[in-house]
């Protein structure tokens, strides 16, 4: 029988005095001027506190704040004396500080559509998010003209409305191909989307080349065709390398571990040095190149 999972929080929401909560850090003045800070402040003003603060009780009127530093600072600025909280069972804040899941643009788009379908006006959403109404309208129509397959590929990616605008100029099959390129390379910028648009063949465009302003002028039709072929080849090769990279590195690590173990045997090393000195040299060179990479990777993982 598997052991029960220990709950991380108390299931009850507790209202605490604001002055009993101890933050772990100060909010810098630069953060108070940021768009994120203003957006959270606007949301608290129009909707109120949706997600309670997470605190760890250390004693009477002594509660360590684990998550919600910006929200607590805004509430203090607004003069509130009490706030809703939930109690954590451990005093660790790593999960909250390092494992926060932000809503990607596609998710924001569907959230806005959901709010609009429930009768919330564009002006109201703009006030809550502290953005212009035009920004809400842009996000509302962000996926118009994008095929469902491309949307699914980019669902969890940080793709801006500008990048989707470039994809809208492509036909569905090319949208899917471009979305796969963006996902394979991990590049979701507007520039990359526009570059994919520029090297798209005319038959895969919604508009003909004469109807759009080209940002890249090819010196000739042959040069343009060559650029398209080279770009497609490069992206296919990159995608293939990405697909096999993990397996290749695992195979290399196992092989090098086996070789290192063989060379630790003095008799084997002596035999290779006497009869196959060139092979021994290549093996030593391979180990010297792989071991620093393994050490660096372990250091990065530990950091």
Image: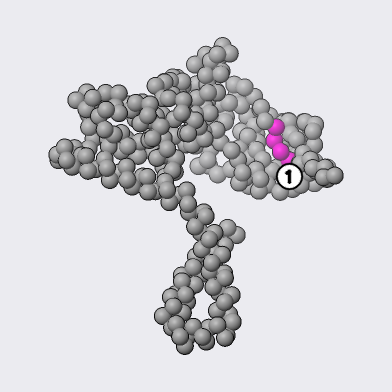
Q: Which residue lies furthest to the right in this view?
A: 1
Looking at the rendered image, the quarter that the N terminus falls into is top right
> Residue 2: x and y, percent?
82, 45
Judged from the image, the secondary structure of the residue bearing numbered disc 1 is strand
Crowding near the residue tagged with mark 1, few <14, some 14–19, many ≥20 C-alpha atoms within 10 Å? many
Magenta-highlighted residues: 52-56
Of the pair 19 and 254, the residue shown nearer to us: 254
Residue 132, visible in the rendered structure: no
The residue located at (47%, 36%) in the rendering is 158
List the residue tagged with mark 1: 64
Of the pair 139 and 81, the residue shown nearer to us: 139
Please state if 249 lies on the left or on the right of 278 as rendered.
right
The residue located at (30%, 23%) in the rendering is 206
The residue located at (76%, 41%) in the rendering is 8
Looking at the rendered image, the quarter that the C terminus falls into is bottom right
Q: Does the magenta stretch include residue 53?
A: yes
When the figure is inspected, residue 287 is found, relative to residue 253, above or below; the finding is below
The residue located at (58%, 43%) in the rendering is 27
């Amino acid at each position: 029988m598997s052991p029960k999972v220990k709950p991380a929080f108390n299931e009850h929401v507790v209202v605490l005095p604001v002055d009993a909560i101890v933050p772990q850090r100060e909010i810098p003045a630069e953060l108070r001027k940021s768009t994120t800070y203003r957006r959270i402040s606007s949301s608290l003003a129009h909707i109120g506190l949706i997600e309670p603060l997470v605190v760890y009780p250390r004693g009477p009127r002594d509660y360590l704040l684990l998550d919600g530093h910006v929200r607590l600072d805004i509430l203090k600025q607004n003069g509130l004396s009490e706030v809703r909280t939930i109690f954590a069972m451990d005093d660790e804040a790593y999960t909250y500080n390092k494992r926060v899941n932000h809503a990607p643009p596609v998710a924001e788009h569907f959230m806005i559509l959901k709010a609009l379908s429930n009768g919330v006006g564009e002006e109201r959403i703009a006030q809550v998010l502290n953005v212009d109404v035009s920004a809400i309208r842009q996000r509302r129509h962000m996926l118009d003209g994008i095929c469902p397959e491309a949307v699914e590929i980019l669902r969890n990616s940080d793709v801006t409305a500008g990048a989707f605008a470039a994809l809208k100029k492509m036909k569905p099959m090319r949208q899917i191909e471009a979305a796969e390129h963006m996902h394979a390379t991990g590049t979701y910028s507007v520039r990359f989307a526009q570059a994919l648009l520029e090297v798209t063949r005319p038959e895969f465009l919604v508009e003909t080349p004469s109807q759009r302003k080209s940002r890249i002028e090819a010196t000739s039709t042959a040069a343009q065709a060559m650029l398209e072929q080279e770009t497609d080849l490069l992206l296919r090769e990159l995608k293939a390398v990405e697909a096999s990279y993990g397996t290749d590195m695992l195979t290399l690590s196992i092989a090098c571990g086996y070789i290192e173990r063989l060379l630790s045997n003095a008799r084997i090393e002596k035999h290779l040095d006497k009869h196959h000195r060139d092979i021994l040299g290549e093996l030593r060179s391979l180990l010297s190149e792989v071991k620093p990479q393994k050490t660096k990777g372990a250091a990065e993982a530990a950091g």
